[in-house]
Image: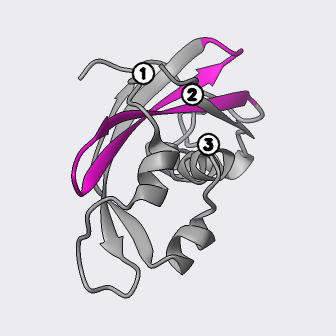
Amino acid sequence: MSVPIIHPLTVRYMEVDAQNVVFNGWYFTYFDEAMGTFLRERGLSYPGMIASGYDVQVVHSEMDWKSGVRWTDDVAVAVSTARIGRTSFALDFELRRNGSEVTCSARNVYVVIAADGSGKREIPPSIAAVLGAPSPLRPA
């Protein structure tokens, strides 16, 4: 099993809704930013991936919310490879408060595409190497 990549962040005032917790749409922004950190920490920058002729797009997302985070909370997003297929892969995310309290968990499925927009591609070795062995954070 590989160790998840951790992406720290602090909740900004503009991300909090009238219920005084982070508005749901921001969670997916957090996960998107954490995915970039995941790639970079494992040796592939997002611009580098595009320069090599590949990009990825989210084709499915699901999130389970447990408790809200609030303005100025210091949290971290843990990211791990959940599944690797021929043209797609899934990443798991956990938003953690105080290092271990999971406030929500999510899974995004990504499809590899050509950076020129010409369609779906098989996962190239450069991306497969970064993904490593699956190590899901949440049940399949």
Tell whether 85 sits left or right of 69: left
Q: Is residue 101 above or below residue 112?
A: above
Tell whether 14 sits left or right of 78: right
Front residue of this view, candidates 2 and 62: 2
Q: Which residue is mark 3?
A: 16
Q: Residue furthest top?
A: 100
Cα distance between the residues tagged 2 and 1 = 8 Å
Q: Which residue is mark 2?
A: 4
Which amino acid lies under the numbered mark 3 shown in the image of this protein?
Val
Name the spot of residue 47 as percent of width and height, x first.
61, 72
Front residue of this view, candidates 13 and 47: 47
Which amino acid lies under the numbered mark 2 shown in the image of this protein?
Pro
Front residue of this view, candidates 77 and 81: 81
State yes or no: discs 2 and 1 in contact (Cβ < 8 Å).
yes
Tell me the SS state at disc 3: loop
State yes or no: discs 1 and 3 in contact (Cβ < 8 Å).
no
Q: Residue at x 52, y 21 (%)?
A: 103
Q: Which residue is mark 1?
A: 137
Image quarter in which the C terminus is found: top left
Choose the circle earlier in sequence order: 2 or 1.
2
Closer mark to the observer between disc 1 and disc 3: 1
Front residue of this view, candidates 106 and 133: 133
Q: Is residue 104 above or below residue 113?
A: above
Tell me the SS state at disc 1: loop
Choose the circle earlier in sequence order: 2 or 3.
2
Q: Is residue 121 above or below residue 10?
A: below
Cα distance between the residues tagged 2 and 3 = 27 Å
- Mark 2 nearby-residue class (10 Å; few <14, some 14–19, many ≥20): some
Range of residues picked out in magenta = 73-100
